[in-house]
Amino acid sequence: MRRATVILVAVLMLFTAVLSGCSGSSGTGGGKLKGKISFMDVSPRPEREQFFRNMITEFNKEYPDVEVDYQTVPWDDAATKLTNMAAAKQLPDVINIYTGWIPQFVAAEWMIPLDTYLDNAGIKDKFTAFTKGYYWAEQQEIYGHIYSIPDGLMSGGIFVRKDWMEEKNIELSSWTWDDYFYLIEALTDPEQNRYGSSYRGARGAFDRIREYLVSFTEGRMYDDEGNCLLYSEENVERFIKFTDVYMKGYAPKDAINWGFTEMVDNFTGGLTGTLNNDTEVVAICQERMEDSQWTVLPLPASTVDGKTYGASGASYGYAVSSFSKNQDAAWAFIEFLSRPENNAEYCKVMTLIPIRTDVENDPFFSEEGPMAGFLAQVNDPNFVVMASYGPFDYTDLHQGPLHAEVQLYLQGKQSADETLKKLSDELASRMKAYLKDNPGTIPQPKSLVSGD
Amino acid sequence: MIEKDKKGFPIRSEQRKNWEPYFFLAPVLLSMLIMTGYPLVRSIVMAFLNYKLTEPNNIYFAGLKNFISIFQADPHIPMILLNTIKWVFISVGCQFLLGMILALALKKPFKGRNLYQSIVFLPWAFSSFAVGIMFRWCLNGEYGIVNHVLMQIGLISEKISWLGSSDLALISVIMAMVWIGVPFFAIMYLAALQSIPSDVYEAATIDGCSRIKGFFLITIPYITPTMITTLLLRTIWVFNAIEMIMIMTGGGPAYSSETITSYMYTKAYGTQDFGTAAAMGLLVMIVLMLYSTIFLRSTRYEESGDF
């Protein structure tokens, strides 16, 4: 009798263990998950907030015992806030992570690898070539694991005042960087208080300059020894050419302080004629402007090899905090947000390119839809995603010196040569220091189509 | 047996008497220790550490490295120190002068004085954030009211980029700071002026004292304690004020409107370098303590009478 009881208890324990194992990390455990998780959105705006609140309601139909606390932080404060929260081990369970923060978060072990969750869910193959061949491939190459699920693909483009071009009878037979500079000059009209460019002078200023400079280095940032390729005699001239957009008065003087908000507001408000920005601005233009007023052109092609070099990647990613006490529920929420129908809706709201193959036939993302220009660009074999700044932590550089040094040049406080040399030297020194411990990690330009 | 006094109450032992004040002060001392003492000690310790939030696994004792890096490795520090001096002296100086003029103008009663007084004292009630946003709009190079008015009256022919020029950015923020700070001086000086007995002035007039002489020989000595206190307090407040700078210019362009305290904030929350920021904070604290001591001694505050 006693032996039978022991056997019965052992069988029951085994059965329980098997059951709990099934409901663990697959993310399909439905109502079995319990508890509270927090999610921080780093780019809040009304439509986005509405989307996430709706998603949480839908998520709770499937997971009624998981409470999702939706938190927001304005984009300008997001990096600081998340870093401070992480230092205090108070990160939200689900982090909305920007690609540039990944090196810092991985090095600090603030995120957990998602490989096992992805494998168990069996959805890896349902993601687009961009996600598998570029976004995840890069994370696996550098960090050995997948740390985040992209929310959508965005790519840069040049937003242009179509009506101004028509007024001035401007027709472009080609679209290289030289054409771009010509267009900016042609659209500038002091009498009508019109400027050709929504010039970025504050945080992110050097990102735009870099886009132009790497079109002369085949998209590369460093040579094999880690020397920065941005600094050269010729590139100093090109730096001057790019910044002449501001120096020659094709942008308002106040633009030296402009970040994302001011650039977009002044473009949609009718002060500037061109805006170099990402897919997400499509939604803002649709809301604030008439269709006849604007259009989007791809990023200009290199005058050297005709290829287009630019930044393209995930708008943000979803990651699970290593401090989360409810990692399974956090993953379940990420998996839910990444489902085809939810991802499609998100991408429509945010005007991004979906990351699931299952939604590529949606008319919104077809050749006739508003995303057509961007889709054509990312599917163009001649489009190359330029190499990143590096796999090292460069948050501090991005928060200050990268734009402040350029501002010093724009204010006539230092020469173009000095500016470019300082920035290149700093980047090179960080890349070399990283290479010492991590040989063979020089970031390389990649094609989204081939993944090479 | 418990010893009792004449009325029959037990006499407290000497030991208990000695502890009593501390017992009653304990809650305040404890909260001060937690709210002020701990952060102070922590920031002093942090000033000697390599403490970057982005490198939580690389925190170590760095000796004087943070202090050395402030003065040797950072090329912007001389300009930022100069900015700080301009920021404090011009802001406080203008606030003091304008506040004094305003107080003198409001000293004598006139019709509608109360209404006028409430209007001119209003800026002090506004939040710095709201004032910063308001000035940022007023000084906008393209749409700002300031450029519009100056162009309308023919003072300028081209739009001025107030916040986009490294020569004007700091002075623009100082303008906003002066606007918000004048009422503080005016309120304090008006109260002090109204407390001067009128018969002192009457006696002086009978003795042939002119108004200017009366101002320097009667008014100023009477309000000296108020002046010392307000100048001391306001200097410390202005020195530490960063909200107007952060809202209007963010310290830019190219650090041109950065002061040592706003730069400290940028270092701490922009680059996450809490070690260097704490070192700056420690230096600022020492400077302010020295300033307070020297200021109070040089103005002979102890001898200047009651406030």
Image: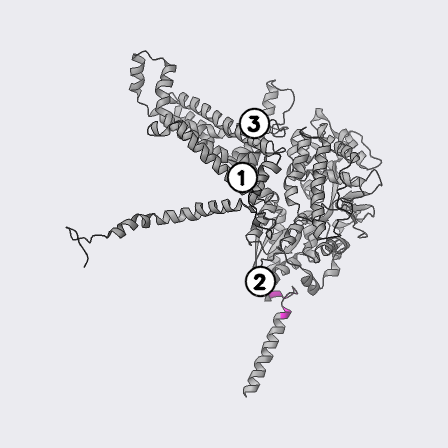
Distance Cα–Cα, label 1 vs label 2: 50 Å
**B112 and B65: which one is in front?**
B65
User: Mark 2 sits on what residue?
Assistant: A64
Circle 1 residues within 10 Å: few <14, some 14–19, many ≥20: many
> In this rendering, would A391 be left or right of B6?
right
User: Mark 1 sits on what residue?
Assistant: B280
Distance Cα–Cα, label 3 vs label 2: 57 Å
The residue at 49%/33% (across/down) is: B238
The C terminus of chain B, quarter of image: top left
Check disc 1 and give the amino acid type. Answer: Met
Outermost residue on the left side: it is: B6
Circle 3 residues within 10 Å: few <14, some 14–19, many ≥20: some
Return the disc, 3 or 1, that comes first in the chain's sequence: 3
Check disc 2 and give the amino acid type. Answer: Pro
What kind of colouring is applied to the model shown?
one colour
Outermost residue on the bottom side: it is: A1
Reply yes or no: does residue A22 show up in magenta: yes
Q: Is residue A167 visible?
A: yes
Q: Chain of mark 2?
A: A
Residue B171: image tag: 3
Q: CB of mark 3 within 8 Å of CB of mark 2?
A: no
Residue B67: image tag: none
The N terminus of chain B, quarter of image: bottom left
Seen in the picture, residue B30 relative to B242 is either above or below; the reply is below
Distance Cα–Cα, label 3 vs label 1: 24 Å
Circle 2 residues within 10 Å: few <14, some 14–19, many ≥20: some
Looking at the rendered structure, whether the residues under marks 3 and 1 are on a common chain is answered as: yes
Corner quadrant of residue A309: top right
Task: Look at the numbered disc 1 and give the secondary structure of its residue.
Answer: helix
